[in-house]
Every structure is written in C-alpha cells, then in structure tokens.
Amino acid sequence: MIDIKSMTYPQLKAFMEGMGEKAFRADQLYAWLHQKLVTSFDDMTNLSRELREQLKQRCTLAGAKVVQQQISQLDGTRKFLMELSDGQRVESVWMQYKHGNSVCVSSQAGCRMGCRFCASTVGGLVRNLTTGEILDQVYEIQRVTGERVSNVILMGIGEPLDNYDNVVRFIRMISGEEGLHISQRNITLSTCGLVERIYDLIREKLTVTLAISLHAPNDALRRRMMPVAERYSIEEIMKACHAYVEQTGRRITFEYTMVEGQNDTPEHARQLCRLLRGLNCHVNLIPLNAVEGRLGTRSKGADIEGFKLLLAKNHTNVTIRRELGSDIDAACGQLRNQNKGGETT
Ligand code: SAH
C-alpha cells in the first residue's frame, strides 16, 4: 500500500498526474490530508466516488491513533499513547501555554542512543517513524482536542537526527502553507548531538530552534551519562552550534538534566559558563524524572536554584523547566514501557 500521508506536495502532484488526474485534484487531496485532517477517503467529498475507490485500493491513510490518554489535574497537560499501524506505540504530549498549544512528538519507536537516565532507550530502537506517522501525532491531537496546535517540539521518544530524512520532510510539510503552516520558528528539534547531522541541517536552510541535550560540561562526565559522547566531543558539538547560530541567526537551547551528585555542583556550573561564553544560547535546566532501573535521582531543589543563580550571574540565559503534568507519567518513554503489549483503555 502506498503511504500517501508521507508524500510531499510535489510528490502527491506527480502521483495524481500518474493516475491521470488533473493537478487541482492533488490540491484537494493534500488539503484533506494535511489541513482538514480526515481519517477516511469517504470523507473526501469533493473527490469523485470512483477516484476515492481507486485511492482506497492503492493507498493507506494509516498514521497514529490514540489508545490511552492521561490528563494532568494540575495544568491540563495531556499525555497520549499512540498506536501505529503495525502495533508499535509511541508517546506524544499536548501542553497549553499562554502563547498557544504545543505538541511534543516522537520520531522513532524506541531509541538507540542509550542515555543512561532515559526510559525511551530501554528496549533499543525498533524502527524509524515515517513522515506520515510523525505528522499524524499532531493531527490526531488536533482531532482529539479540537484545538489548534501552534508549536511543535521534536523531543519525544527517539533521536530525531537518527531519522533524518523523515524528520526534515516532517518539518517542511508541517510548516508548508499547503499544510498546517506552523512557523518553523515555532518548531524545536532536540538532539543528543549527532554532529554531522547538525551540519546537514544547517544546509537545509530551515529556521527551527535547535536544542542540544548536553547534560554535562566536560567529556568525561558526559561519557558516563550518554554513550553518544564516545562518538562526539563537546568541542565538536560546540563548533557545530556556533555554525548553526551563524547560519540561521537562531538562538540555541541547551538542555541540562540535573542528576543529584553527578552534574549539579557549583564547579559544573562554572565549567558550563566557560563553555557557552560568547554563544547566543539559553540553558534549560531539567530536574531529572527518575526512572526505575535507570541512572540517578533528581537534584535537590536548592542545588538546582544555586546552579541557576551561578549561570545567571555569569550572564548565561537560564530557566528551570516548568514542570507540566508532574502528576502523570511525565518522563518520556515510561508510558510506552508500561504498555508493551498490555491492555489499554
Ligand atoms: N533524543 C533527543 C530527544 C528526545 S529526549 C535528545 O536527546 O535530545 C528529550 C529530552 O529529555 C532530552 O534532553 C533528554 O536527555 C531528556 N530526558 C530523557 N530522559 C529524561 C529523564 N528521565 N528526566 C529528565 N530528562 C530526560
């Protein structure tokens, strides 16, 4: 079956031409898929019955379907367990902010990066998500909530730059004016720092916000927390970040998950300041969501505050991640792990 939801606008045009259809039919079909977000060919009422039948026989509309939902009683954050057409499950999160609604999407089923504190990597990588499956997480959330999404964060399960082509196509399609037209400035891509891929991304000339999961201010410590640090030094990552800022003019975000007694001392804060000096960036301190069987416990509140103050004193932009949905399974990968083949509601 042909996966038409993953087709770009030009690809869909060529496909429809190949079926002997006029160009405007591709416009109509693309709008049904990527603006009106229908889930069945029968809903595409301005296409002839004959064309709908042909499409049904050749193409699939499979994407992501909500199978479980947790709603935070504290702030309305909703976490969704989504099932894909082969039964794989991923997580997506919907968060409400003053400036609009954000959706955090997964890019892979599982992950092969192996970060020692993370739940998503426990079973390794199962497979990459298709572009259509990444798109459909946003679409499904719009369908379920009935609300418009204005920000997208590639920060769910998986390493987006390890599924590079599908993720870049996702960014182009969701920001394209024939689709949901979400500004690239409102899209954030979070990576553990696959350096060659950051340079590739620079060449794409996208204007998304890049977030780097740094978590440590020196290589020795970073290697203890993240196996990927064996492949790339912090120096190489920083060079790529400088290039990214230079080329895109976008400020970089550094994520720094705070693990008690590991990376949260004043000396670590000073090292981090030295590292980031002169770069247009922002540090987001994330209190660890401790995962059973994984590395570490969360830093004490006072240590996180102290860390933040030291950075601020050194003129480094810093925030502590506002914890949304702390009463639901917030750490990504946990919901998926609990539900491996289990019953869902
Ligand atoms: N692979 C990408 C995106 C997914 S992880 C990346 O590494 O950036 C999203 C963010 O959550 C990363 O910064 C990751 O390091 C962090 N994270 C993972 N597990 C966590 C946990 N248990 N507690 C706090 N942050 C966590």
Image (cartoon, rainbow, N blue to C red):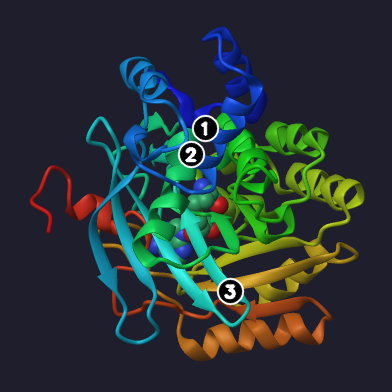
217 displayed left or right of 64: right
What's the residue type where badge 2 is placed? Leu
SS at mark 3 in the image? strand
Q: Residues within 10 Å of mark 3 (few under 14, many from 20)?
A: few
The residue that appears at 42% across and 49% down in the rendered structure is 137
Q: Is residue 343 visible?
A: yes
Q: Which residue is mark 2?
A: 33
SS at mark 2 in the image? helix
Label disc, if present, on residue 29 of the rendered structure:
1
SS at mark 1 in the image? helix
Mark found first going from the N terminus, 1 or 3: 1
101 displayed left or right of 66: right
What is the quadrant of the N terminus in the image? Answer: top left
Q: Which residue is mark 3?
A: 100
Q: Is residue 157 visible?
A: no
Decide: is 128 above or below 319: above
- Whether the residues at callouts 1 and 3 have beta carbons within 8 Å, the answer is no
What's the residue type where badge 3 is placed? Gly
The residue that appears at 62% across and 18% down in the rendered structure is 22
What's the residue type where badge 1 is placed? Leu
Q: Nearer the viewer, residue 208 or 192?
A: 208
- Closer to the eye: label 2 or 3: 2
Residue 202, picture quadrant: top right
Return the x and y of residue 150 as percentages of the image width and height: 60, 64
- Whether the residues at callouts 1 and 2 have beta carbons within 8 Å, the answer is yes
Ligand 1 under 8 Å from disc 1 Cβ = no
The residue that appears at 47% across and 25% down in the rendered structure is 4
Return the x and y of residue 141 as percentages of the image width and height: 40, 58
Return the x and y of residue 35 as percentages of the image width and height: 54, 48
